[in-house]
């Protein structure tokens, strides 16, 4: 095929100058198919620059472009973005169909096929190019001459001009529409949510139509050679045959099986030569394109045409299994395998599922848009979702439909429920990208944001604060909290992450507040616990009562008595955690939150507490009022509480040491790490360290066994980062709590920032929400200062971060470059972090 390259477009040949970064992935893939000798129809590629020009009104020479396809062109236009996952405008087929071509095709292909082709083009052109309401064109209308005439009249009535008959005018309209669709605000926001840069370009490919209609065996279909859900080898797809049963263009009864099947005819039977060709082409694509590909094809009178080859859309489980198989077959290397799976894709494998053996009350079933299941408190605004996440509470965000302004709330929510939408809706797309369970299109529900209610079809009312269960795998919404099953991770998953562990060069620990969290982290092969928030152990009902007794104690003796009851509870939890981690490091943060968080604030709760403590309501209210603060997050909490009520830290230190000794007796050496929160002065560390050393000495004397521990500081205040060199003299590690450090550096409340954060990001004040992505310029600078000053004073000082930033790939890259020893993140982000660190190491080695 002779090369024909013009200024605005390039005919795709084996020698044409085509680049993914200039013409997109589809154009480049078609060229590779041509080079492999596959029967690809004549195709022309328009570059990113040309499409950008079209959107601005600079149309290429359409007449010259169409001349590539002969005197009576019939073509399609498809998008060609740099990454197919970024999407693009829908394909437009049969450009060039007009009254004359329609009449000629009736003679050559029959009236049914000609009418169906023309009707399809009229509808597509009307909706995508002329922007008419698709309800004006009935897709179920019979492909008759009357239907064609009705569609043409409808177009003219709405646009006040006849349907264009000139193929040049048709093609120009399609190119203009697709170009402008790409640069629309909604399309830009959608592809950015899928990871595309702001300046991402679009190419277009114009291809000669291979109709798949005609005499003998004709039809169209897609074939892939792997199960997209499991990744196991299996021929799947579909084929619509014109010659089997009714016309495939107008009736899906023409669908037949691909492989031999006792239930009916198959392509393998009716056209074995073409079937064998497709299987051979599939294997060739796997070898040469180095991936599992789906072939789009047509058969016309027994002749095969390959229209496109795209990567098989696959689940996360299939992605992992496919790259392992490709690697084991020698097609790709381990490095390629590790780099091909996005860390966030692993979230699909990790989320819990609803226990199917436990019956539940199903409120409704809708579209299962993003896998996994979640239990949470019902909220109706993104701001509320962010506030709850800031307090470590799980919630289900319910909206009629989501918009780009909701992305941060969606990120914070454990699950997303919408009344409207489908699989490609904003909520569905974003939720899948985030790995958040999502159910959309719950049209039987009435979600009222203003009233803060959901009304079911049966009339039951759910209010904000109620607990529901969302099953993003089945589409079910259930009342109350259903028991969950942890994800079943297979051998492929373990093998894949073991490859990641072989190359990563930074540790990954887990934030685990309970033995249950620790068990999940252990199953995900975390290197230890980087943050165990001990206060979360006190919220269980039986412990909360004792905790409140301690808060209301009038004398140190009474306080000691309450703490003595809490001691064995803490010790039991620590023993379980130490045993689960089996000798891996466990970093325990001493008590941090203000005491008022353990007290009720509503009238009913106050009455119940007064009854439980046998105190007058007035006394209870007076103590609650006394503990109230104007800004509790900067008030009596953290080490300040530990110095004011030192008995709390004494009890916790004793529980830690006694648990460590008892577990060590079983053979596993336990050296606990104790971390002091919210430090801002060296003297705070000195005082706490002195008391902990005294407790250690006492336990050692009582038990007759040596007590060993490592002391660290949680760097959450800017001052602590600035005096890190002095703090290093008193501790063996610094762990940066980036949640509070971000809050204090910016002077932002995590609870309230959601009210304006979206506006700030849209206006470019912040490039991203600093509570989701680590701020390198401000907070990151404090991390670098703290790390440099700390290690200057103590070269062996261990450094880490333990906020939720620890699971973010960009934050991990920052910490790795800064020489940190490990990052710590929530349990279900550990596998993602393991893969992310491996990818960073591989990319860094490639650069070097």
Image (cartoon, rainbow, N blue to C red):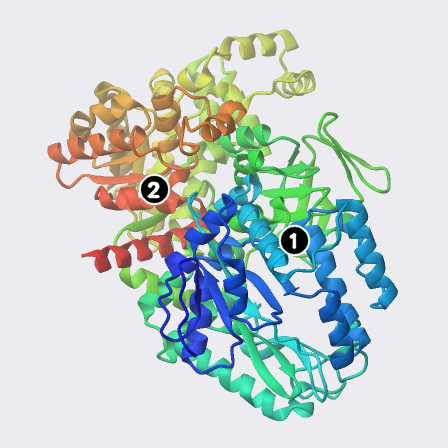
Question: Is label 1 in a helix, a strand or a loop?
Answer: loop
Residue at the spot of label 2: 811
Q: Residue at x 79, y 79 (%)?
A: 110
Q: Which mark is residue 246?
A: none
Residue 239 appears at what percent x and percent y? 67, 78
Q: Residue visible at 58% across and 54% down?
A: 172
- Secondary structure type for disc 2: helix
Query: In this figure, which residue is indicated by the disc labeled 1?
Result: 423
- Density class for disc 2 (Cα within 10 Å; few <14, some 14-19, many ≥20) is many
The reply to whether residue 248 is visible in this rendering is no
Residue 419 visible in this rendered orientation of the protein: yes
611 vs 291: above or below: above
Q: Position of residue 42 (x, y in %)?
A: 51, 74
Q: Which of 728/149 is in front?
A: 149
Closer to the camera in the image, 661 or 690: 690
Say which quadrant the N terminus sits in.
Answer: bottom left
Classify 294 as above or below 469.
below
Cα gap from disc 2 to disc 1, whole angstroms:
31 Å
Horizontally, is 413 left or right of 198 in the view? Answer: right
Q: Earlier in the sequence, mark 2 or mark 1?
A: 1
Relative placement, left or right, of 693 versus 201 is left
- Nearer to me, 613 or 479: 479
- Seen in the picture, residue 366 relative to 24 is either above or below; the reply is above
Query: Label 1 near label 2: C-beta < 8 Å?
Result: no
Quadrant for residue 332, please give it: bottom left
Position of 157 compared to 311: left or right? Answer: right
Which percent across, then down, holds residue 337? 37, 67
Crowdedness near tag 1: few (<14), some (14–19) or many (≥20) residues, C-alpha within 10 Å? some
Residue 744: x %, y % from top left: 36, 22
Q: Is residue 449 above or below residue 662?
A: above
Query: Which quarter of the image is occupied by the C terminus?
Result: bottom left
Q: How many marks?
A: 2
């Amino acid at each position: 095929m002779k090369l024909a390259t013009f200024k605005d477009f390039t005919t795709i040949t084996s020698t044409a100058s085509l680049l993914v970064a200039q013409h997109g992935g589809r154009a480049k893939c078609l060229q590779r198919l041509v080079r492999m000798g596959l029967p690809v129809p004549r195709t022309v590629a328009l570059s990113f620059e040309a499409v950008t020009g079209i959107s601005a009104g600079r149309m290429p020479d359409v007449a010259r472009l169409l001349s590539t396809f002969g005197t009576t062109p019939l073509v399609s236009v498809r998008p060609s973005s740099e990454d197919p996952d970024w999407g693009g405008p829908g394909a437009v087929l049969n450009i060039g169909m007009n009254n004359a071509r329609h009449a000629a095709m009736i003679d050559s292909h029959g009236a049914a096929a000609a009418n169906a082709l023309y009707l399809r083009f009229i509808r597509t052109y009307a909706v995508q190019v002329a922007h008419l309401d698709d309800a004006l064109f009935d897709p179920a209308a019979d492909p008759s001459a009357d239907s064609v005439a009705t569609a043409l009249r409808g177009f003219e009535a709405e646009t006040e001009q006849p349907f264009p008959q000139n193929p040049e005018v048709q093609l120009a309209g399609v190119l203009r529409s697709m170009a402008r669709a790409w640069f629309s605000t909604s399309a830009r926001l959608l592809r950015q949510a899928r990871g595309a840069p702001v300046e991402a370009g679009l190419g277009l490919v114009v291809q000669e139509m291979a109709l798949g209609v005609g005499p003998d065996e004709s039809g169209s279909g897609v074939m892939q050679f792997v199960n997209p859900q499991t990744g196991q080898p299996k021929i799947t797809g579909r084929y619509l045959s014109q010659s089997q049963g009714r016309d495939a263009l107008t009736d899906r009864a023409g669908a037949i099986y691909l492989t031999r099947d006792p239930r009916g005819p198959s392509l393998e039977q009716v056209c074995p030569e073409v079937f064998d060709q497709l299987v051979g082409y599939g294997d060739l694509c796997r070898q040469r394109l180095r991936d599992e590909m789906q072939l789009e094809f047509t058969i016309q009178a027994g002749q095969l045409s390959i229209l496109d080859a795209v990567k098989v859309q696959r689940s996360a489980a299939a992605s992992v299994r496919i790259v392992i198989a490709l690697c084991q077959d020698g097609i790709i290397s381990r490095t390629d395998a590790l780099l091909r799976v996005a860390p966030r894709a692993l979230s699909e494998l990790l989320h819990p599922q609803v226990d199917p053996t436990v019956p539940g009350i199903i409120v409704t079933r809708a579209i299962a848009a993003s896998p996994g299941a979640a239990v949470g408190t019902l909220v109706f605004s993104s701001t509320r979702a962010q506030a709850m996440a800031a307090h470590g509470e799980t919630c289900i965000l319910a909206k009629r439909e989501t918009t780009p302004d909701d992305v941060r709330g969606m990120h914070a929510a454990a699950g997303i429920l919408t009344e409207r939408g489908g699989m490609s809706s904003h909520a569905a797309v974003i939720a899948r990208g985030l790995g958040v369970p999502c159910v959309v299109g719950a049209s039987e529900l009435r979600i009222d944001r203003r009233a803060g209610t959901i009304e079911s079809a049966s009339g039951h009312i759910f209010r904000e604060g109620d607990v529901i269960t969302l099953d993003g795998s089945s589409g079910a919404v259930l009342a109350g909290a259903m028991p969950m099953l942890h994800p079943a991770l297979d051998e492929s998953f373990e093998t894949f992450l073991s490859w990641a562990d072989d190359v990563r060069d930074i540790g990954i620990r887990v934030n685990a507040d309970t033995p249950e969290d620790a068990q999940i982290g252990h199953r995900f092969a975390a290197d230890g616990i980087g943050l165990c928030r001990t206060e979360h152990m006190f919220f269980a009902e039986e412990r909360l009562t004792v905790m409140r007794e301690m808060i209301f104690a009038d004398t140190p003796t009474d306080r000691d008595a309450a703490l003595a009851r809490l001691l064995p509870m803490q010790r039991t939890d620590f023993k379980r955690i130490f045993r689960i981690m089996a000798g891996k490091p466990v970093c325990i943060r001493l008590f941090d939150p203000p005491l008022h968080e353990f007290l009720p604030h509503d009238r009913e709760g106050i009455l119940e507490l007064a009854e439980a403590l046998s105190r007058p309501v007035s006394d209870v209210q007076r103590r609650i009022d006394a503990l109230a603060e104007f800004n509790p997050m900067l008030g009596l909490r953290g080490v300040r509480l530990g110095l004011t009520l030192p008995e709390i830290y004494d009890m916790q230190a004793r529980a830690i040491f006694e648990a460590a000794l008892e577990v060590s007796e079983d053979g596993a050496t336990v050296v606990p790490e104790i971390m002091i929160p919210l430090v801002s002065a060296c003297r705070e560390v000195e005082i706490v360290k002195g008391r902990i050393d005294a407790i250690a000495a006492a336990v050692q004397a009582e038990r007759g066994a040596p007590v060993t521990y490592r002391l660290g500081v949680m760097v959450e205040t800017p001052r602590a980062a600035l005096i890190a060199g002095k703090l290093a003299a008193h501790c063996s590690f610094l762990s940066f709590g980036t949640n509070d450090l971000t809050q204090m550096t910016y002077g932002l409340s995590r609870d309230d920032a959601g009210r304006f954060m979206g506006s700030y990001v849209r206006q470019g004040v912040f490039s991203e929400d600093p509570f989701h992505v680590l701020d390198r310029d401000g907070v990151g600078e404090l991390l670098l200062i703290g790390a440099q000053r700390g290690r200057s004073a103590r070269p062996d000082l261990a450094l880490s971060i333990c906020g939720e930033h620890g699971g973010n790939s960009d934050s991990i890259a920052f910490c790795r470059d800064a020489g940190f020893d490990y990052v710590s993140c929530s349990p279900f982000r550990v596998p993602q972090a393991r893969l992310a660190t491996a990818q960073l190491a591989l990319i860094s080695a490639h650069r070097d």
